[in-house]
Image (cartoon, rainbow, N blue to C red):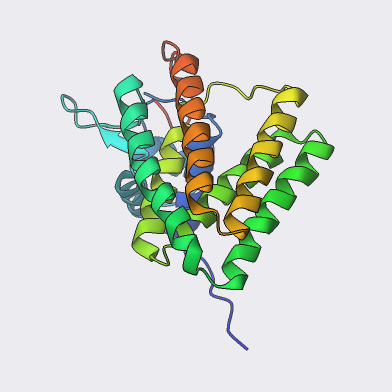
């Protein structure tokens, strides 16, 4: 039996701060300082420093070129376009690799789509988005490369920063679910080119929706963790 590894204080701090950023408790453009985060989380500055370094490596935090203070990444239209360009390369390559994927890997795609269906039936918008993200991660996973999967995960974290709201429309859930179910069927049937066209169309639509959703950055909140 494998032992359960305990998370370090730095790892726990990284996870907590990452969640605050991705949930927009700390808004894009907000300054993040060691003192403020240490006070909020009740940990040492050394621990916070490790957490901030990790999030900087993930691309969620960037240094202001003038002040050198860490800030939450704020995406503009060019950033979104670059992220989607990279997603196309990785995810379409994943579809091609699915032709040689083992059964257990294909089963993961089916499970992700099943989770989307369950979320849609329960009108669980957050759960739907999470299952949707998993389906894209599984697609890249067909490449069987940890480096590429980590790169894709970083892209997905960054794109979440541009989401200003969830479009809580049941019709949208139904349409998205149907498209994902079709994609899953095409992959399982080995219809690679059709699956690639399905995915490319969805990525194009997602990119355009993301670009439309970009608004003038909100004023950073003034709380611990952001000054």
- Image coordinates of residue 148 in percent, x first then y, are 36, 57
Please give the name of the residue rendered at 29% of the width and 23% of the height, measured from the top-left corner.
78
- Image coordinates of residue 174 in percent, x first then y, are 74, 31
Which is nearer the eye, 191 or 182? Answer: 191
Q: Is residue 54 visible?
A: yes
- Image coordinates of residue 61 in percent, x first then y, are 34, 38
Please give the name of the residue rendered at 49% of the width and 64% of the height, measured from the top-left corner.
99
Please give the name of the residue rendered at 36% of the width and 25% of the height, measured from the top-left corner.
75
Quarter of the image with the N terminus is bottom right
Which is nearer the eye, 37 or 53? Answer: 53
Quarter of the image with the C terminus is top left
Q: Is residue 33 above or below residue 205?
A: below
Q: How many numbered callouts?
A: 0
Which is nearer the eye, 174 or 13? Answer: 174
89 horizontally vs 212: left or right:
left
213 horizontally vs 70: left or right:
right
Outermost residue, top direction? Answer: 216
């Amino acid at each position: 039996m494998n032992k359960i590894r305990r998370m370090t204080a730095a790892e726990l701090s990284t996870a907590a701060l990452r969640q605050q950023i991705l949930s927009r408790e700390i808004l894009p453009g907000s300054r993040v300082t060691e003192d403020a985060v240490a006070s909020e989380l009740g940990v040492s500055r050394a621990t916070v420093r490790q957490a901030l370094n990790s999030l900087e490596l993930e691309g969620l935090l960037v240094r202001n070129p003038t002040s050198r203070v860490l800030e939450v990444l704020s995406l503009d239209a060019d950033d979104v376009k670059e992220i989607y360009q990279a997603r196309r390369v990785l995810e379409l390559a994943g579809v091609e690799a699915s032709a040689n994927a083992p059964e257990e890997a294909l089963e993961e795609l089916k499970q992700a789509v099943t989770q989307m269906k369950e979320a849609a039936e329960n009108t669980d918008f957050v759960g739907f988005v999470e299952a949707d993200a998993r389906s894209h991660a599984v697609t890249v996973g067909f490449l069987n490369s940890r480096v590429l999967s980590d790169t894709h995960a970083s892209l997905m974290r960054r794109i979440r920063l541009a989401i200003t709201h969830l479009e809580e429309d049941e019709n949208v859930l139904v349409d998205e679910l149907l498209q994902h179910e079709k994609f899953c069927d095409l992959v399982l049937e080995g219809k690679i080119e059709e699956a690639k066209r399905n995915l490319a169309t969805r990525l194009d639509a997602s990119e355009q929706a993301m670009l439309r959703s970009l608004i003038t950055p909100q004023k950073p909140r003034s709380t611990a963790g952001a000054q």
